Image (cartoon, helix red, strand yellow):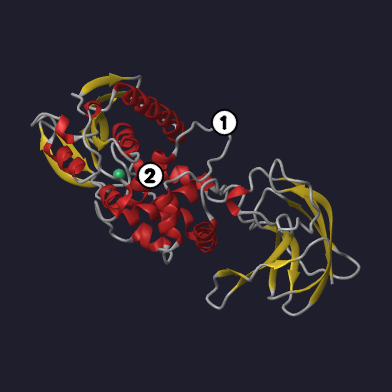
Amino acid sequence: MDLVETLKRRRIAGALIVVLCLTTAFVESLAAQGKRNRTGKNASEQLAPADYRSKNFLIHTDLPPDEARDLLERLEKMLVIISTYWGSPNRRVIECYVVKDLANWPPGSLHPAGFRSIAGGGGVTMSQTTYRGRQIVAAKSIVYATASRGTPQHEAVHAYCAQNFGRTGPVWYSEGMAEMGNNWKVVPKKGQPLSVSCERYVIDYIKRSEPKSLNEIVNSRETTGDSWQNYCWRWALCHLLATNPNYAPRFRPLGLGLLMNKPASFNKTYGSMAREISFEYLFFLKHFDQGYRCDLCQWDWKTKFRKPNSVRPLTSKIEANQGWQASRTLVEAGIEYQFSADGEWKTSSDAERVTANGDDAGQGTLVGVILLENENDEYELSDEFELGETGRFQAPATGKLFLRCRDDWHELADNSGKISVKISE
Ligand SMILES: [Zn+2]
């Protein structure tokens, strides 16, 4: 939701005080689009602020007690996830002012910057960090947030980063990860990858927009409170990098480097894989939805491909629960190839088993696509074409043939079975 801006840096008794200010104005602009209808106040809304505590949080809030305790529980769960992710236990209680209705707060009870952010429909995290030399000796963050739309969770990620690392990183990282924290609603079982779980408007916005380039996201000088749209792109990039196994192993050290002010940058980390990331980023934007799993749809850049011939057909195993998979076959535009597919698979846990011909609706059909490199040296995909159990196909382009079991992209996880595919000329 927000953007980090250093408001003040001044020396006081040898201590450097950094105030990180985050404001969000988009929440209300969304609400203004007509979703929320304002009802008259009832007695339950007029609550004096009270304090609630848990292991890592102290919240002052006018939320009803059950909602306040719910929020604490969600914040604690999220903190387990993020502190596990960054490998650093939270060192200090995170204090939050969570406001349902500003009318419940006596004048002067909120910091003016906090009041302004909340009135604008968002939140702010203010952090005071004390250094000795370059070493952080103390850090304390205070969150001011509206109670709605995951704002407390988002701000709490900033607070955790500021308290534990002394900074929250560059805008794209800080805000992208804060949005991820907001979307991390359940503690994943060990090793269980994260599926897409974000607000509907994020998906709708990205699907109807021209993709924003990676370079624009990470290298442009975007500033605080810019636009809710920019938060969507930052989240999308961070989600992809954190959950696609092709990029995730480098993403965590990159993030830690940024948080600890080491000489780390997106370009240094991913420069050598720029073409691959760019391709997978655009692919993700096109196909993601609630439940989409970047790990299942990661692109196979390693498998070697070669031309098939009539004596030596190329065989590959295609899993029902994954995205495009390497057939190991290099194809040439206009040439006809012969294929046969052996086995059965299912496109959901309660679906019937089908062969590579799929069901009557076309679900479960074996389909193909060609990965090629265009004149700009970028990776590109041909149109998808149907294969099935056996037959011949004419390659629509020259390149690497990838195969998959047709199913909605965000519903691959519950598929099962695999099919063995043979291709010859
Ligand atoms: Zn933020």
**Residue found 15% across the figure and 38% down from its top:** 115
The image position of residue 55, as x and y in percent, is 35, 19
- The amino acid beneath tag 1 is Lys
Task: Work out whether mark 1 precedes mark 2 in sequence or the reverse, and give the earlier one.
Answer: 2
Answer with the quadrant where ligand 1 appears in the image.
Answer: top left
Q: Is residue 273 above or below residue 334?
A: above
Secondary structure beneath dot 1 equals loop
Mark 2 Cβ inside 8 Å of ligand 1: yes
Figure label count:
2
The image position of residue 378, as x and y in percent, is 54, 70
Q: CA distance from mark 1 to mark 2?
A: 22 Å
Q: Is residue 192 above or below residue 294?
A: above
Q: Which disc is residue 190 wearing? A: 1
Report whether 148 appears left or right of 316: left
Q: Is residue 267 visible?
A: no
The residue lying furthest to the right in this view is 311
The image position of residue 173, as x and y in percent, is 37, 48
Q: Residues within 10 Å of mark 2 (few under 14, many from 20)?
A: many
Q: Nearer the viewer, residue 266 or 371?
A: 371
Quadrant of the image occupied by residue 162: top left
The image position of residue 258, as x and y in percent, is 36, 45
Q: Please name the residue that numbered disc 2 is placed on.
A: 179
- The amino acid beneath tag 2 is Glu
**Residue found 79% across the figure and 47% down from its top:** 353
**Residue found 25% across the figure and 39% down from its top:** 39
Q: Is residue 109 visible?
A: yes
Secondary structure beneath dot 2 equals helix
